[in-house]
Image (cartoon, rainbow, N blue to C red):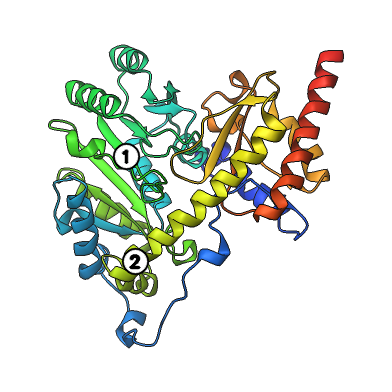
Amino acid sequence: MAFSERVTRLKSSLIREILAAAQRPEVMSFAGGLPAESMLPALDWADMPAAMGQYGTSEGEPQLRELLAAEARALGLDCQASQVLVLSGSQQALDLAAKLYIDKGTEVVVEGPTYLAALQTFQLFGAECLSVPLAADGPDIAALRARLEQHAPAFAYLIPTFQNPSGVRYSESARAQVAALLDEFKLTLIEDEPYRELTYDGGMAQPIAARLRQASWIYTGTVSKTLLPGLRVGYLIASPDLFPHLLRLKQAADLHTNRVGQWQAMQWLGTDKYRDHLGQLRDFYRGRRDAMQAVLLEHFADLADWHLPQGGLFFWLTLKQPIDTRTLLGPAMAQDVAFMPGEPFFADPDANPGCLRLNFSHVAPHRLQEGLSRLAHVIRKAQAAQTAA
């Protein structure tokens, strides 16, 4: 068969493969970013108009676009509903941005580590991903400047609030310095914020896009982490110079986002019941985070270093004795434990061994002790074999 040249760069999604393998009920899965099923809200469909079954506009439902624009303005982002594009999950924003900017060999800036599905999407279109190391409060600013001085990237893809996978939330200083650099080099920003609402210390920060004065930007989010991922409703808000191009790409991709999911999102956003739900969600996940922290201290204190995440759904562990954690997947699954190796979150996986991402939202607390003790045993055994070799 004569497939496109792009298909030769197509890689399967490791996280989707692990989740598929972890479907057995006995498997304790720390792998995916799955919400806790007990916290998925009950949906009422009784009043949904029959017209929602008809084709809709490519931009999205007008009322939903107004609600999303109002939420963004409350964060400090100067925008109107006319800049909002409702998507089939925020993952679609990465696909549209890649189509807009990337040809084979196009350079883009990403964090190291970064969201692995973003790497997969950008590399599928032929991008050369330039990593900038991530510290506890944001990217290495000197390294970012060096990248921009030495290269001509098409955009910077950043996750400044409870970054996936590291959990890092950029400090105010880091946000200001990043914005200043992007403006100086007039570099487009793609700011991905799926976990913004899952904050456990009450802290909020203005998006980087809201601080830009010269650079173009795309700001993207989703209701998947706060309502139901199965609705597949996300959004992007773009600077006026980019929006028309993204809209045409959306039209070519799937005409419009499903109206049934959009209608449900409209029943929640901006309402008291949504605010109450977010409060319950934060309390619930804060409890699960704290439970995992306690068990990690018991089983991993001598194995790894990590920071307590202030939001999001993940712990990011760095092993004190580095080992390629991809080699641990088979032994862990044999013990009915799934986790996410850290290497695929880097543009150069082989140069960054020894990290792993653990989700704390999905596994019930009474299974944490057994699951993490088994995983720690797998790691100790592999490290002992590595030392002996």
Check disc 1 and give the amino acid type. Glu
Rendered image: mark on residue 191 = 1
Q: How many marks?
A: 2
Report whether 325 appears left or right of 330: left
User: Circle 1 — which element?
Assistant: strand
Name the spot of residue 349 as percent of width and height, x first. Answer: 59, 25
Quarter of the figure with the C terminus: top right
Rendered image: mark on residue 274 = 2
Figure quadrant of residue 214: top left
Name the spot of residue 230 as percent of width and height, x first. Answer: 49, 65
Front label number (2 vs 1): 2
For the point 37% across and 40% down, which residue is it? 98
Name the spot of residue 91 as percent of width and height, x first. Answer: 42, 50
User: Circle 2 — which element?
Assistant: helix
Q: Nearer the viewer, residue 286 or 188?
A: 286
Figure quadrant of residue 217: top left
Rendered image: mark on residue 112 = none
Check disc 2 and give the amino acid type. Tyr
Q: In the rendered structure, are the residues bearing label 2 and label 1 in contact, judged by CB atoms less than 8 Å apart?
A: no
For the point 13% across and 55% down, which residue is it? 80
Report whether 10 appears left or right of 74: right
Name the spot of residue 259 as percent of width and height, x first. Answer: 35, 73
Report whether 106 appears left or right of 237: right
For the point 55% across and 44% down, which residue is it? 290
Q: Nearer the viewer, residue 243 or 214?
A: 214
Q: Nearer the viewer, residue 360 or 350?
A: 360
- Whichever of labels 2 and 1 marks the residue nearer the N terminus, that label is 1
